[in-house]
Amino acid sequence: MAVVKSLDKADEPWGNLTTVVVDSGLLLNEKSYQRVINALNNMRGIFNKVLFLYHNLEEKAGIGNISSLKDINFDCKFSKDRINDSSIILKDYFYGKNPSLVDKLDAGKKILYLGERRSKFIDTFTPPKGLACHKFYKVVLGTGCPFNCSYCFLQLTFRMTPYVRQYLNLESLFKEIDSIDKIGKPVLLNSGELSDSLAVDPIVKSVEEVIDKISNTCNVSLLLVSKGTNVNHLPDIKNNKVIISASLTTPINAAVFEDRTADPYSRIDALARAKAKGYRIRCRIDPIITYSDNWEEEYSELIDYLFDMVEPEVITLGQLRFYPMLLQFIKKRHPKAGEYFLNATREMGGGGRCRTEFESRAKVYKKIINLIRKKNKEPLMVAPCKEEYRMCNRLQIPFKGCNCI
Ligand code: SF4
């Protein structure tokens, strides 16, 4: 009912989700209870089923109190503790006995889990050893994502809990933000490390509350990163505290290597709309993939369009990099992409990741940087992401900053 049906498919990345799972612990706090109710109301008509997981009698009673759910098809299940939740969701409820990891990963893309974050929302990201990468603050508003990019490292990171998780106990987050604000130094919270920041927000609607909180701090800013186009629901802002960053590629790469993401040119259009609403704009072109014979021309057109529509303050660049184990998953879930990646990333580079060969990688970076330098009038920051120091030296890019700080 509440979802705007005039949006096109790319604007509705939740279209593939079939089941909502609610951690009933959320029902015991008045504010998170209200967020669950609002989200479920926004989702009416989208999901086949809602599953409430309860861990004690108090939580079970909380489910009974939801009178507004009368017309929603829902089940309740007991889970003896939260560590057990994923097994209930994926084995008993969704898939039956003994699903393979690939089955779980596929099933996870159909499930939206509204949960409580029990560990800290905000943490520092420690750069992997041997890579030119900054320490930055990450904020975990959720994990996982309804998009299905073949190269996504989250397939490995969240292989045991592969569903799209959104955390709604935001009062705990707000306390952490207050503590960080009191330190008195500027801090940027990156919400795009473990999820797509905006993919399901039009139905879950937690980001607006976070933006409001951040807007009322002295020192804290927020980075939202997305491969979608969902910015219309975000509020206009009048401060410089929220950055929206689009993750970009060429349309051919998006068609071959990304599943369900928005058309890259539409992502740039969304950046322009976000800019008009008062947001700061960045982007990342990562992973750059030279799959097409015309890759240079295609990236040139993309970069031209980007600068015609918005002037990003930072552009982060990256190229294919995989832990060997991730490549095994990719081969099974995205066979065509997996075969290409296996052939393209034969060099074991820094950070224990398979990468494309150093010299050809340097050439690709140089070409993309030249395309950017041709277009931008002001010197803007271009930074490689999770690259080797020797690459930064080769490109003569001083290791100063990136999207994440
Ligand atoms: S949009 Fe990002 S988080 Fe989502 S599947 Fe693609 S790479 Fe992973």
Image: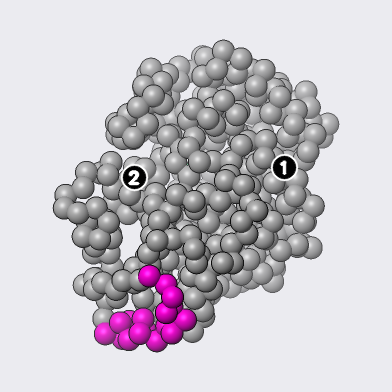
Q: Amino acid at mark 1?
A: Asp
Q: Is residue 201 above or below residue 248?
A: below
Q: Nearer the viewer, residue 390 or 45?
A: 45
Image position, residue 141 (x, y; %): 50, 61
Q: Is residue 391 left or right of residue 236?
A: left
Q: Residue at x 47, y 81 (%)?
A: 68
Q: CA distance from mark 1 to mark 2?
A: 30 Å
Label 1 vs 2, first from the N-terminus:
2
Does residue 287 show up? Answer: yes
Q: Which residue is mark 1?
A: 269
Image position, residue 293 (x, y; %): 56, 13
Q: In the rendering, which numbered label is found on residue 106?
A: 2
Q: What is the span of residues highlighted in magenta in the rendered image?
A: 57-73
> Are the residues tagged 1 and 2 within 8 Å (C-beta)?
no
Q: Residue at x 44, y 75 (%)?
A: 71
Helix, strand or loop status at disc 1 = helix
Assess disc 2: are there few (<14), some (14-19) or many (≥20) residues with their C-alpha within 10 Å of its C-alpha. some
Q: Residue at x 67, y 35 (%)?
A: 265
Image position, residue 181 (x, y; %): 61, 68
Q: Is mark 2 within 8 Å of ligand 1?
A: no
